[in-house]
Amino acid sequence: MCGIVGYIGKEQAAPILLEGLSRLEYRGYDSAGVAVFDGMSGTLAVHKAKGRLQVLSDQLHGGADLNSTAGVGHTRWATHGAPSDVNSHPQVSRSGRIAVVHNGIIENYAELKTFLLAQGVPFTSETDTEVVAQLIEYFYEGDLLAAVGRALRRIQGAYALGILCADCPDQIVAVRKDSPLILGYGEGCSFIASDVTAILRHTRRVGYMEDGELAVLTREGIQCYDHLMQPVRKDAVTIDWEIDAAEKGGYEHFMFKEIMEQPEALRRCLSPRIRQGEVVFEDFALSEEYLAAMNRIYIVACGSSYHVGMVGKYHLERLTRKPVEVALGSEFRYMDPIVDEHTLVIVISQSGETLDTMAALREARRLGGHILSIVNVVGSSIARESDQVLYTWAGPEIAVATTKAYTTQLALLSLLALWMGNRLGTVSQEEYRRAAAAFLELPGKMEEVLSRRDGIQYLASQYFNHDSIFFIGRNLDYALGLEGSLKLKEISYIHSEAYASGELKHGTISLIEEGTLVVALGTYEALFAKAMSNIVEVKARGASVLALTTQGRREEMAQTADAVMTIPDLHQLLLPCLGVVPLQLFAYYVALMRGCDIDKPRNLAKSVTVE
């Protein structure tokens, strides 16, 4: 949520800021603004607008109206204060000398605001961010870094800050705590950004700020400091993917593009890790002694990554015979988890910056757990704070509704379960070999599913006008249904719920009436007969049933269900990876037919960096 871009260099800043902000629109926002240093007047020029970034860009004629080579920009997703021009960022101090852009939440803003009001400081917005700008100015006596340091010692919460001061035209100050912020190193220029996509057109050399660090950006370079204001050496890394990977490439929506990219993303994720029939993880080590002594596994994640964990639980318990618990990142700290040195905590996050998941990781580490993370973004906070890291190599994902990040996470967690089972001796060599070979078949099988997408589009045209939809399934199909339901509700705004089929008679079936759409999942072979029984059960109450099953079970399913989607037969371990693709496509086409903003659904953000 929210987006920050900052630039200082020799070119005009405003066009660069607006272009960078346009590449952060996918994060979700409701207003936008920029602040630049006006060299003619020696003041800060601040321009803000509620609504889409294009509103601000039109007001500034693409940035041509602002003559400046240093500035910060922001796209805001409202937390404190309703969306409005006044509540938009940047927020400025009462004199207009200090301007601040901010991602995160200042938890003690009310206390600080009360203090400042008592000192006669007036406020114009409802935001917690204005408190930061006013507090820095309150402490400012000619030394900006000293003022920022004094303010930070009084601020509690999560924040990434970009700070301009009218008295310091040749620098931008950046601060990070529990909210991502990267540094960009250019030729004669420097950048800050929430995401590398915002600055990739200008530089590939980036650095990752650590919690508690402060950075001073100039045209000559960037100097970082720790929380004690001691200089810190920051090594730059080079981003190796192309900017085209973060553009639509002729597709109407990023989501559809990313659905279609899944086979190639899986090849990148899996091919280097399966060699001559063996699962191989380089730069990764969990000894057989550790695995044997391991007493439990926690999987900690949020949103779609949590649904990955739900599938992973079934795989891990079956293949390793170790107890597995899946916990929401937002709940983990508050459930008094039983974690010790024999507990493996698998943390899953696409961005590697999810705040709730990060907090859960730190709690698990405090309790002595061994942290293994599955993330997409190299060098992200979760990756850096983990004992072991497995990267999905999915490439940039722009649409808010995750697709290829989900499938690569799921494939990688499933591969890990197979590897662990082999190391523990709890999976037979025959199954190990068959499953390892099946992983290499997965991308091709997924291409088969995508090639039949016209049939799914037709089904979406038959069912898009439903207002309430239920997903039912057992075991792996229940876990898969959770993700299918989430995809549908988040981009089409249709009320959708997923239930374990065996729970229907414990209350849910009372909601089934004539014409209710039920998406019934029947890909789990061991419980196919029970899945069929549940379909008969809901049809007897008047439900219309859209089923998902394997090609080998299509004819039997078609005798009962009203319509059937199929996936190729493959090893059971990998059917959830295949099964989610028709559900992604169904959600996409339904949302398209309902006229929804597919890539930027209302009220949602790509990266959740507040609690």
Image: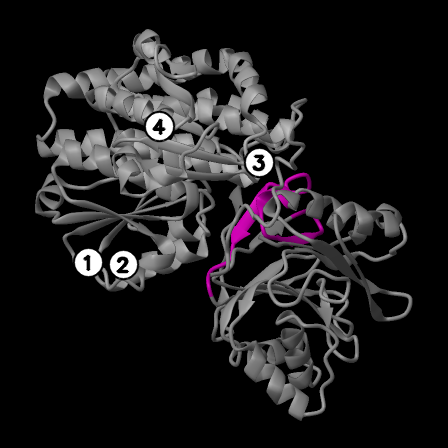
Mark 3 secondary-structure assignment: helix
| Mark 4 or 1, nearer chain start | 1
Q: Which residue is mark 3?
A: 492
* Residue at 55% over, 83% down: 111
Mark 2 secondary-structure assignment: helix
| Mark 2 or 3, nearer chain start | 2
The answer to whether residue 198 is magenta is: yes
Residues shaded magenta: 186-211
- Characterize the local packing of mark 1: few (<14), some (14-19) or many (20 or more) Cα atoms within 10 angstroms: many
Mark 4 secondary-structure assignment: helix
- Name which residue type carries label 1: Val
**Image side of residue 252 versus residue 497, left or right:** right
- Characterize the local packing of mark 4: few (<14), some (14-19) or many (20 or more) Cα atoms within 10 angstroms: many
| Mark 3 or 1, nearer chain start | 1
Q: Which residue is mark 1?
A: 339
Find residue 429 and report its horizontal and vertical position in percent.
Answer: 11, 20
Circles 2, 4 touching at the beta carbon (< 8 Å) = no
Circles 1, 2 touching at the beta carbon (< 8 Å) = yes
- Characterize the local packing of mark 2: few (<14), some (14-19) or many (20 or more) Cα atoms within 10 angstroms: many
- Name which residue type carries label 3: Ser
Q: Nearer the viewer, mark 3 or mark 1?
A: 3
| Mark 1 or 2, nearer chain start | 1
Location of residue 591 (image quadrant)? top right
Find residue 76 and report its horizontal and vertical position in percent.
Answer: 66, 57
Q: Nearer the viewer, mark 4 or mark 1?
A: 4
As drawn, the label of residue 364 is 2
Q: Which residue is mark 4?
A: 538
The answer to whether residue 448 is magenta is: no
C-alpha gap between disc 2 and disc 3: 36 Å
**Image side of residue 379 versus residue 245, left or right:** left
C-alpha gap between disc 3 and disc 1: 39 Å
Find residue 258 and report its horizontal and vertical position in percent.
Answer: 54, 28
